[in-house]
Amino acid sequence: MLNAFWREASAIANGHLQAAQAGWEQERGELEEFRDQLAAAFDTQAGELTAAYQASSALRAEMGKREEQLTLLKQRVSDAETNAGNARAALEHGQAQLRELHESLRQAQLAQQQLAQQLQDQHVAAAVAAERNLGEQTRYAEQLGQARQEVAGLRAQLAATLTSKNDLLTSGADAKSNSKPRKENRS
């Protein structure tokens, strides 16, 4: 009985041992499979980590470039604002000069109008003076004509006087010549 009991206990123990070995084998297989999955997951995770690190490095580099671009853009914006301020100042200065030029033009136009009025007044005065001078010239021309007529009359009188004088001289000379030949005859 002891033998039977031993056999029975050995059989039960072997059964349990075989069941335990089968469980261990199954657990070991599952553990191997889990280890393989864990290694694959680790490799995948390591690849993803490497990819993430590379992507992070690329993003950092891109972020650095973007920061440089942002700095450049900020500088350009600052320069543009400075240029815009300068342009506004130049525009205001130009507008002030334009206002001054408009005022100068207005004053020049007023001066031109005054000069035009003065010239017109001088022209009218010159026209009046010219008419007065024309009247005086006409009067002088009439006086000159009268003076010429008087001179012509005086010349005619002078010519008549000279003719009379010549006639008298001629008659006096004739009378002398008539009296001289007698003396010559006597001589």
Image (spheres, grey):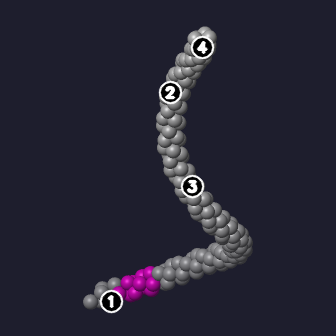
Q: CA distance from mark 4 to mark 3?
A: 98 Å
Q: Is residue 44 left or right of residue 96?
A: left
Eye-nearest disc, 1 or 4: 4
Q: Identify the element where label 2 is drawn.
A: helix
Q: Is residue 78 left or right of residue 129?
A: left
Residue drawn at x 54%, y 81% as measured from the top left? 158
Residue drawn at x 50%, y 81% as measured from the top left? 162
Q: Identify the element where label 4 is drawn.
A: helix
Position of 3 relative to 119 (above/below): above
Q: Is residue 105 visible?
A: no
Q: Is residue 174 magenta?
A: yes
Q: Nearer the viewer, residue 106 or 45?
A: 45
Eye-nearest disc, 2 or 3: 2
Residue under numbered circle 2? 39
Amino acid type of the residue tagged 2 in the rendering: Ala
Position of 15 relative to 146 (above/below): above
Q: Which mark is residue 183?
A: 1
Residue 128 lies, in percent from the top left, at: 72, 74
Q: Which mark is residue 74?
A: 3
Q: Are marks 2 and 3 in contact (CB under 8 Å)?
A: no
Q: Are marks 4 and 3 in contact (CB under 8 Å)?
A: no
Of callouts 1 and 4, which one flags the residue occurring earlier in the amino acid sequence?
4
